[in-house]
Image (cartoon, rainbow, N blue to C red):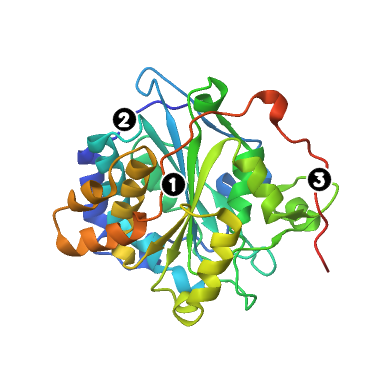
Amino acid sequence: MGHGRWDPADWDSFSTTTKTMRADEIFTSYGIKKALDPKEIAYREARDSASNPNSTPIIIALDVTGSMGMIPEYMIKEGLGTLVEEILKRKPVSDPQIMFMGVGDANCDRAPLQVTQFEPDIRAAEQLKDIWIEHGGGGNHFESYDLPWYFGAMKTRLDCVEKGRRKGLLFTIGDEEAPPGLRASQLKKYLGDDVPQDMSSKEILAKVEQMYDIFHVVVEQGSHCQHSRSAVFNSWNELLGQGRVIPLADYTKLSEVLVSAIEVHEGANRPDVAASWGSKSTSLVVSKAVKDIVPANRRLPPASAKPSAGGITRLAS
């Protein structure tokens, strides 16, 4: 657990194959794989090792509904290599271990959450290929972006948190509005968890923030955001607060934006980070994306401060 190091040669070999393939030739699953099914997972671990002594877990939860299929395709062909190699070069955090999630709509999709392992090497790309691009979603103006929060809070084990070093990082990525919460029946159906009542997104967020710094990337090129921009940003700003909602003007710059968000979150100067990419077009996208991000507060709450499983709110029918 946590063993291995990123080798650019492995990525070059992998991406040389995928970059000429259609998305449906890369993502060949036609249903959720058992290895990625949250019901089959007791928990995922991001552990320190000799090769990664100060592991930093990074969850990247990708919307895989109908309007967002270009995002996983970008990550598997190009984005993952940029993401990992720039983190390793710039060192905003140490020893990154990447987990991908596929996110849909718990109200109507067959697989609203799929979960890979935390991986420090090319296995992150190999497991991303196994995600089923369901192309689902509904007409309710949100996807279940709170499912990754619930999984992160309840079904991950992190050395960085248990050893008191720092929180992990969790990014959800999509073009729709913030979700209202999850029903107890949905948590039972898709994760196998028995909870006494429905949970609001605010309650799930309070739990996951004990272990992760949370961000949401709004894909402005997504069809829903193009038609309902104000509603999308207002809903996310109300839920997450200033500095945690990241506008993405060009999805082909997603990795640069994620790396830059981590850098600024770790205390780097915003203009310096934006200028560091060289390309004017990339710098403009990054500058807009990170303009509200504030440095992290790395103090973890004491164990006694963690909320109990009680006190959760029932959602309206």
Q: Residues within 10 Å of mark 3 (few under 14, many from 20)?
A: few
Residue drawn at x 61%, y 36% is 210
Task: Describe residue 118's horizontal placement relative to residue 261 as left or right.
Answer: right
- Callout 1: 10 Å neighbours few (<14), some, many (20+)? some
Dot placed on the residue nearer the N-terminal end, 1 or 2:
2
Q: CA distance from mark 2 to mark 3?
A: 37 Å
At 83% from the left and 57% from the top, the residue drawn is 314
Q: In the image, 165: left or right of 3?
A: right
Q: Position of residue 160 (x, y in %)?
A: 49, 26
- Camera-near label (1 vs 2) is 2
Q: Which residue is mark 2?
A: 5
Name the image quarter holding residue 304: top right
Q: Residue at x 27, y 47 (%)?
A: 81
Contact flag, marks 1 and 2 (Cβ < 8 Å)? no
- Front disc: 3 or 1: 3
Which quarter of the rendered picture does the C terminus lie within?
A: bottom right
Which numbered disc covers residue 127?
A: 1
Q: Amino acid at mark 2?
A: Arg
Q: Nearer the viewer, residue 238 or 164?
A: 238
- Look at the picture and state if 193 lies above or below 231: above
Total marks shown come to 3
**Residue 8: % across, % down:** 22, 40
Secondary element type, mark 1: helix
Q: Is residue 305 visible?
A: yes
Decide which of tag 3 and tag 1 comes sooner along the chain: 1
Look at mark 3 in the image and give the residue it sits on.
194
**What label sits on residue 219 in the rendered view?**
none
22 or 5, which is in the foreground? 5
Q: Amino acid at mark 1?
A: Gln
Residue 38 visible? The answer is no
Considering every residue shown, the one lying at the far bottom of the view is 227
Callout 3 secondary element = loop
